[in-house]
């Protein structure tokens, strides 16, 4: 049985005068003991930004580039505070984990190519791929022996895909159609990465507890939704986000066909300046990206890309999560190239 991390309740210091709340963060017992049972969680907000966007971790790239009203979140903690229950053994049946000697062939070449690229780049990155056409899976730097490989990433606006999945399943449970308001909010949330829309839908699905319940029910066990209105602080791993996308788009999965088509249309029509990463791999790609400057990393950037793309007959679900970038542009370059490396390997080499 998979061991579970214990939950350490930490208190957000909401410096804009917001009320305090507790935020559960997963840690291993060993990490808790080493830390003396203490950790901190703080959020710093721009006074110029409207309070209704308190959960808005990223805006459009133009707004982020201008630095106006960008929300920042800080999640400092003790050594190992972000370590999760995920182990190499747990994931071995699903993905081939980097850090294990390469088996050779195209996978070994891909390990080396991705490793060499990331060694020249600032920050930290991890990737997972599922080739729905062949059933093959791949992961780089996830669940390995290095401490950094066991730390989850903040999702920022990639969490909006998780919210969309939970919304569609809640509508199905209630045996009804999406309302006009829900359709509009979902479209704005995905296509324009609108944070106010995401906050409204996050409340509608039950917030942290509601999203956690949906994800655990689908077997997505290593994703921890943000507390209160802070959906953007959701933490996860690339393989888990690939699973979320798989549940959302699989024709044999839990989402009805009309809802799958709705989600696919939204992700295929993200506004151009937000359609980088997986969105640049091929025509017709479906994508949702996330980006934010994180106070916990001294203002360095978290940049993520999640999407579905078909290349040479291979239907690929790809998630690249990263952090500690000196700029948003640096992160976009990193996740875009990692996505391209793995996509081309699957498309051109795995079937060779």
Image (cartoon, rainbow, N blue to C red):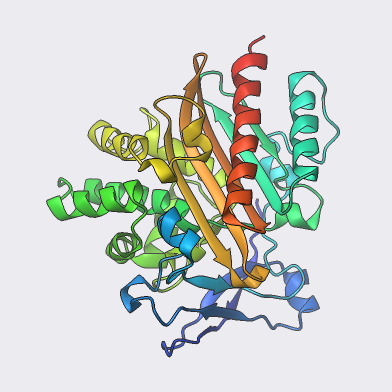
Q: Residue furthest right?
A: 101
Q: Residue at x 43, y 64 (%)?
A: 231
**Is 251 left or right of 341, judged from the image as shown?**
left
Q: Is residue 220 above or below residue 265?
A: below
Locate the C terminus by quadrant.
top right
Give the residue drawn at x 31%, y 67%.
203
Residue 27 percent coordinates (x, y): 67, 68
- The answer to whether 258 is drawn above or below residue 314 in the figure is below
Q: Residue furthest top?
A: 352
Q: Give the residue displayed 31% in from the left and 74% down from the top.
A: 52
Residue 206 sits in which quadrant?
A: bottom left
On the image, which quarter does residue 89 sit in? top right
Q: On screen, 348 above or below 211?
A: above
User: How far across and how far down the image is residue 240, in percent?
Assistant: 55, 46
* Residue 98 shows in this picture: yes
Determine whether, in the image, residue 78 is placed left or right of residue 263.
right
Residue nearest the viewer, comparing 8 with 349: 349
Q: Nearer the viewer, residue 149 or 1?
A: 149
> In the image as oriented, which residue stretches furthest toward the front?
66
The correct choice, above or below, for 249 with respect to 1 in the image is above
- Residue, x 40% and y 53% (percent of image)? 160
Does residue 58 appear in the picture of this structure? Answer: no
List x then y, in percent, for residue 226. Answer: 47, 67
**Position in image of residue 88 (x %, y %):** 74, 45
Which residue is nearer to you in this view: 7 or 177? 177
Task: Give the side of residue 199 with respect to residue 33, left or right.
Answer: left
| Number of numbered labels in the structure image | 0
């Amino acid at each position: 049985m998979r061991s579970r991390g214990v939950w350490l309740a930490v208190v957000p210091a909401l410096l804009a005068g917001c009320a305090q709340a507790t935020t559960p963060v997963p840690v291993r017992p060993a990490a808790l003991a080493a830390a003396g049972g203490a950790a901190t969680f703080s959020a710093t907000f721009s006074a110029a930004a409207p309070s209704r966007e308190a959960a808005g971790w990223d805006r459009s790239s133009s707004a982020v580039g201008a630095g106006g009203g960008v929300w920042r979140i800080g999640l400092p903690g003790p050594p190992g505070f972000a370590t999760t229950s995920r182990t190499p053994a747990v994931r071995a049946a699903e993905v081939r984990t980097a850090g294990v000697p390469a088996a050779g062939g195209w996978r070994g070449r891909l390990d080396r190519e991705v490793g060499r690229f990331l060694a020249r780049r600032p920050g930290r990155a991890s990737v997972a791929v599922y080739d729905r056409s062949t059933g093959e899976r791949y992961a780089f730097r996830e669940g390995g022996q290095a401490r950094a490989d066991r730390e989850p990433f903040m999702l920022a606006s990639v969490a909006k895909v998780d919210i969309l999945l939970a919304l569609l399943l809640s509508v199905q449970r209630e045996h009804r159609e999406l309302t006009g308001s829900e359709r509009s909010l979902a479209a704005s949330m995905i296509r324009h990465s609108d944070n106010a829309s995401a906050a409204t839908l996050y409340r509608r699905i039950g917030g942290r507890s509601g999203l956690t319940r949906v994800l655990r029910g689908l077997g997505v066990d290593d994703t921890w939704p943000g507390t209160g209105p802070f959906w953007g602080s959701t933490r996860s791993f690339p393989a888990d986000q690939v699973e979320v996308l798989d549940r959302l788009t699989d024709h044999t999965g839990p989402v009805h066909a009309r809802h799958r088509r709705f989600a696919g249309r939204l992700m295929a029509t993200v506004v151009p300046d937000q359609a980088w990463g997986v969105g640049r791999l091929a025509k017709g790609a479906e994508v949702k990206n996330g980006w934010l400057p994180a106070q916990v990393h001294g203002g360095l950037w978290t940049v993520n890309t999640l999407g579905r793309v078909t290349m040479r007959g291979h239907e690929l679900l790809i998630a690249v999560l990263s952090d500690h970038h000196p700029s948003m542009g640096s992160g976009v370059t990193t996740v875009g190239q990692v996505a391209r490396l793995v996509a081309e390997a699957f498309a051109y080499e795995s079937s060779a």
